[in-house]
Image (cartoon, rainbow, N blue to C red):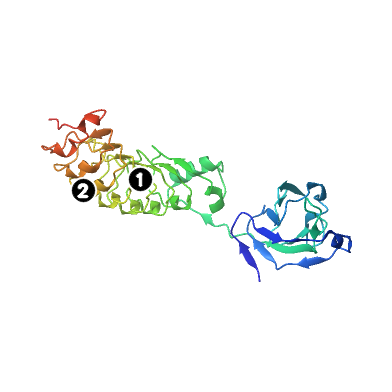
Amino acid sequence: MNKRLAALFITIFFLFSALASCYAAESWETWSTKTTDNPYKDWTVEFSKYVSSDTVNSSKIFITDSTGNNIPAEISISENKINIKPEHAYVAGESYYLYISKDIQSGDGESLQSGIRMPFVYEEEYDEVIHFADPNLEAVVRGTIGKPTGEIYRSDVQNITELYADLSDIKNIEGVQYLSNLEHLGLFYNDNISDISALSNLSNLKSLQLGNNNIEDLSPLANLTNLERLYLGNNNISDISCLSNLKNLKYLDLHNGKATSYNHNDISDISPLSNLTKLEMLHLFNNGISDISALSSLTNLKYLWLGYNNISDYSPIDGYRENLKNNIFEDAF
């Protein structure tokens, strides 16, 4: 039965027998066919004893195609393991054979009962063409992957961990969900981004810059629990309840600049922040906040901006107020 290999390598175990058997004519024990979707699949053979490097070469462990032609490969040895890695990509749909000769010996002179022949097939996974709704976002992605024209495939973007699309006049971020390995995403100062649902499954994100846009609904961020830095200043946010589960946050910006050319946050209830005890920097400048009791548990804060709100009682932060490095929290008029 075929078996798809999800891991980077498989390990083959088999035991050494008496040396005398190695002088018999080579016989091969054929294993069941394996299937891999890795075009450069390497194989690691693990023996029960240390391997004698003097008995290992390209005639003792090798890969052939279906017609018997040897596939150029690099062989490496580490104690009781031999790794064989092809120098070139396999051909999709082609059958290959990994051979391990019984003449390979252990350090104390034992060899195998029989050679091993393991058939395997490389089956290319379907590589989906992906699309970006906004041409300006597509242009940033193309610049990042160095592909100015042609179809963009899922495989083209799988290695992107950082994407900076600030000040790019982007209105629609549909398509960014395909960048599943993103850790840092910058969409600052695009002004008109309102729907961020495409971010909901980007669970590797650590830093997200969404300041100066037109965002109201933060629910797509609710499960992005690896976030450490989140910038949401100057949007249309009033409800931050979806942030309560983002317990790895260290920096959170929810300020409101009130500049005429920008959108305005109007946050009054900050109780969801009480769980975010790793916060070191919190920017709540210029909202509609009067009750800051939720901040009493945020004892790791080093920087806190509370100015231009409706706060009269600052006692909830008395426990750490002297540790703040800026003390920019008084209301100003």
SS under mark 1: loop
Residue at the (31%, 37%) spot, across then down: 280
Most foreground residue, 327 or 115: 115
Question: Residue 248, which numbered label?
Answer: 1
Residue 3 visible in the picture: yes
Say which residue appears at 27% left-offset and 38% top-offset. 282
Disc 2: CA contacts within 10 A as few (<14), some (14-19) or many (>=20): some
Q: Nearer the viewer, residue 228 or 258?
A: 228
Side of 63 where 161 appears, left or right: left
Dot 1 alpha-carbon crowd within 10 angstroms: few under 14, some 14 to 19, many 20 or more: some
Q: Position of residue 125 (x, y in %)?
A: 60, 60
The amino acid at mark 2 is: Ser
Which mark is on residue 117? none
- Counting from the top left corner in percent of width and height, residue 303 is at 27, 33
Rendering coords of residue 273 (x, y %): 25, 46
At label 1, which amino acid type do we have? Asn
Label 1 to label 2, Cα distance in Å? 17 Å
Quarter of the N terminus within the rendering: bottom right
Residue identified by numbered label 2 = 271
Residue 128: % across, % down: 54, 57
